[in-house]
Amino acid sequence: MSSDPVIRPRIRVGTSGWRYPSWRGDFYPEGLVQRAELEYIGARMSTVELNGSFYSLQRPASYLRWRESVPDDFIFAVKGSRYITHMLGLRDARTALANFFASGLLALGPTLGPILWQLPERHEFESEVLDEFLGLLPRSTGAALELARAHDERMHGRTWLETDADRPLRHAIEPRSHSFDDPRLRTLLRRHGVALTVADTAGRWPRFEPNDADLVYVRLHGSAELYASGYSPGELRTWADRCLAWSSADGIRRDVHVYFDNDAKGHAPHDALALARLVGDAPSAS
């Protein structure tokens, strides 16, 4: 009698972004052209966090180029638009979300991973506002396509409105206000199936523990100096142990995504590779 194969949780480790001048001649070899940097990342890591999408809407051609630069089993996490999180404050966000998903995310196809919504420190917990916003988030690429079709006229001529398959779509939220230390938060996240980000920020912002979503999303901004300090071998071992425990805690299958954002002095890619080795995250050969 045959049984279904066991699907094991996957721990993926990468960096937040990949275009940093200080990495050139250090992590990136001397003479490596800028357009080849993502391909270099893709050969050594299993994931990367796209952060250009936070600052402005990208174009479909960019998403297509990024997808073509990495192996088929690579995953892009995509940082949600700061227009939605920082300017709208999550309020009345339907059209802005439609524009965001119409801008080309779906062109990533099977390499499209979780969407990160990073909130500013000034954004305090408001249960009703957060509940309404989380209810707008599409839970599949098919639902994202339907939402994207509601884009406004500013997007005409620069949209991607197709998907090759209807896949699950996951979201994570990264609060930076202590007001989110509220039991209602986890109730809301459970209702909407959204992950609570674990952020290490050298004590600048609160660090929350994961909730019970099937995704643990971790951002490591530096343990001693925000965005700048590297992680010691002991600190990396501690984070590896946490990731391994989270991936199978309480009998729940959880994928764990870890992104190093301590890029100011070039530590991020080296720390990412070191942690990846500790948790057994080895990308397939391209």
Image (cartoon, rainbow, N blue to C red):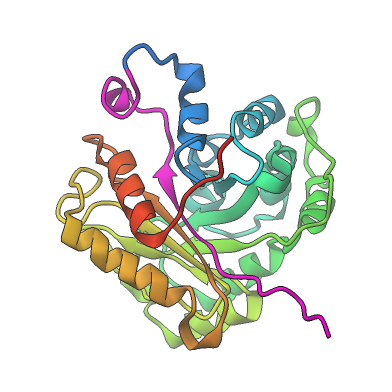
- Residue 173 visible, this angle: yes
Where does residue 205 sit, x and y in percent of width and height?
A: 27, 63
Q: Is residue 266 above or below residue 201?
A: above
Q: Magenta segment: does it hold 121?
A: no
Location of residue 35 in the rendering, given as x and y in whole percent from the top left corner: 51, 18
In this view, the residue in front, 85 or 250, is: 250
Question: In which quadrant of the rendered image does the C terminus lie?
Answer: top right
- From the viewer's perspective, is 214 left or right of 21? right
Magenta segment range? 1-29
130 in relation to 64, above or below: below
Q: Magenta stretch containing residue 14, yes or no? A: yes
**Could you tell me which residue is drawn at 35 percent across and 25 percent down?**
28
Magenta: main secondary structure? loop
Q: Image quarter for residue 187? A: bottom right
Residue visible at 37% across and 76% down in the picture:
209
Q: Is residue 228 left or right of residue 76?
A: left
- The answer to which image quadrant residue 121 occupies is bottom left
Quadrant housing residue 138: bottom right
